[in-house]
Amino acid sequence: MTRQVFEAYFKEQYSLVYRVAFMQMKGHADAEDVLQEVFVRLLKYQPQFENSEHEKAWFIRTTINICKDIIKSKWHSTTVSIEKIPESEKNYFNLPHVKEDETLWAVLELPEKYRSCLYFFYYEDYSIREIAEILGISENTVKTNLRRGREALKEILKDS
């Protein structure tokens, strides 16, 4: 892989990978670690992409897998978890087309199975079928997680 090709992937996918990593890890430093590992794997494995959707799906799937590996690691399981995202971290997660979005921060407080489905559906514009493929779950599970996630989100937003 040439330097120019790698830089093109980095410029195109940096924002997406960072947002997905931040959604999973809930912290700037952890998201940056995941981002770095995703691009190391790109260099190491040099996958051949069929089209832009295949490319995007590879980056999302790889990001999610790295996040899961970190979350189930011994280090991560023995450190203190902060459930809510600190205010200081929020400025690292900016969607280019959204100025201010308190709903996003409420989504990030949900359990992972609801958070992922809602995020990919509403913020990355994936269909239920595509979300099922990305997350490796059935379409019915995605639908259930969307419904339950919306209900949980209503409760969070009602309380705030």
Image (cartoon, helix red, strand yellow):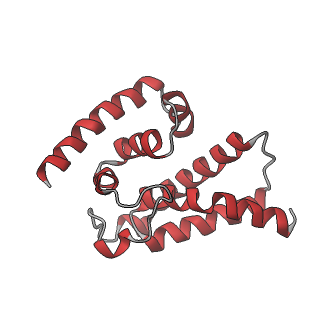
Query: Quick check: 72 above or below 82?
Result: above
Which part of the image, by quadrant, shows the C terminus? bottom left
Residue placed furthest toward the top: 140
The answer to whether residue 44 is left or right of residue 39 is right
Q: Residue 5: x and y, percent?
A: 82, 62
Number of dots carrying numbers: 0
Q: Residue 87: x and y, percent?
A: 29, 72
Residue placed furthest toward the right: 2
Residue 94, picture quadrant:
bottom left
Seen from the viewer's position, the closer of residues 127 and 58 is 127
- At 53% from the left and 51% from the top, the residue drawn is 64
Seen from the viewer's position, the closer of residues 99 and 53 is 99
Seen from the viewer's position, the closer of residues 71 and 128 is 128
Q: Residue 65: x and y, percent?
A: 55, 51
- At 65% from the left and 47% from the top, the residue drawn is 56
The answer to whether residue 130 is left or right of residue 106 is right
- At 78% from the left and 50% from the top, the residue drawn is 47
The answer to whether residue 97 is left or right of residue 78 is right
Q: Residue 76: x and y, percent?
A: 40, 66
Which part of the image, by quadrant, shows the N terminus? bottom right
